[in-house]
Image (cartoon, rainbow, N blue to C red):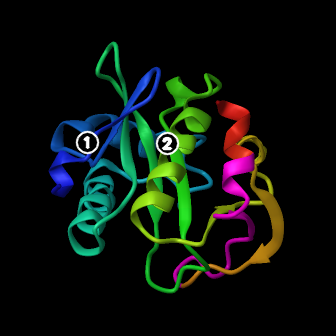
Amino acid sequence: MGVADIHIETERLVLRPPRIEDFDRFAELLADAEACRFIGGHLPRAAAWRKFLQQPGAWLVQGFGMFSMIDRRSGLWLGQLGPWRPEGWPGNEIGYSLHPDAWGRGYATEAGVAAIDWAFANLGWDQIIHCIAPDNHASQRVAQRLGSTLRGPGRLPAPYQDAPVEIWGQTRAQWPVNRGRFA
């Protein structure tokens, strides 16, 4: 199965590698100062384009990256979520960022379960983490719902080395018990 063939369905969502048609909504996310304050800050459209290309590049080079999260009914891009491991990162992350109109609907948790399942089944990872700013309480709640616990402070590589971050996570052995809450 090639990268383009990866297609995961949940009750309300489709998770798949990013496509060009996802970019407009991605650019809207990065244009919203509140929505992107914990993921590197506001970017104008031209810079958002370069950041957008990170995920397709990760898929091509590493064989994984964050999925585009698509509403099954409308086809609307809701955000990105999934495995992420840049050079120098403190671990194998399941990261997430959602368009503001997708907040508060449980999409991150629903997609997170599917992405963690996929990562453990396909990437051979023994644990996953979430790098979360101490003030990002919404992301902390998602991590907790997924069964991750706070492991302590972390440090990201340059150019993010000065951004405060906490590491949340769980092991492959913990996941079946944590996932059982969603069965």
Magenta-colored stretch includes residue 38: no
Up the image or down, 131 lies above or below 138; here it is: below
On-image quarter of the C terminus: top right
Up the image or down, 50 lies above or below 98; here it is: below
Q: Tell me the magenta residue range.
A: 158-177
Circle 1 SS class: helix
Q: Which mark is residue 81?
A: none
Of residues 143 and 170, the one nearer the viewer is 170
Magenta-colored stretch includes residue 168: yes
Q: Is residue 140 left or right of residue 63?
A: right
On-image quarter of the N terminus: bottom left
Q: How many marks?
A: 2
Which residue is the site of mark 1? Answer: 23
x, y percent for residue 134: 80, 59
- Where residue 180 sits, quadrant-wise, is top right
Which residue is the site of mark 2? Answer: 114
Q: Please state which amino acid type lies under the numbered disc 1.
A: Phe
Circle 2 SS class: helix
Up the image or down, 133 lies above or below 92; here it is: above
Q: Circle 2: is it few (<14), some (14-19), or many (20+) Cα within 10 Å?
A: many
- Residue appearing at x 53%, y 30% in the figure: 100
Whole-angstrom CA distance, mark 2 to mark 1, is 23 Å
Residue furthest top as drawn: 73
x, y percent for residue 41: 53, 56
Q: Please state which amino acid type lies under the numbered disc 2.
A: Ala
- Residue appearing at x 57%, y 37% in the figure: 108
x, y percent for residue 177: 74, 48
Of residues 125 and 159, the one nearer the viewer is 125
- Residue appearing at x 80%, y 75% in the figure: 153
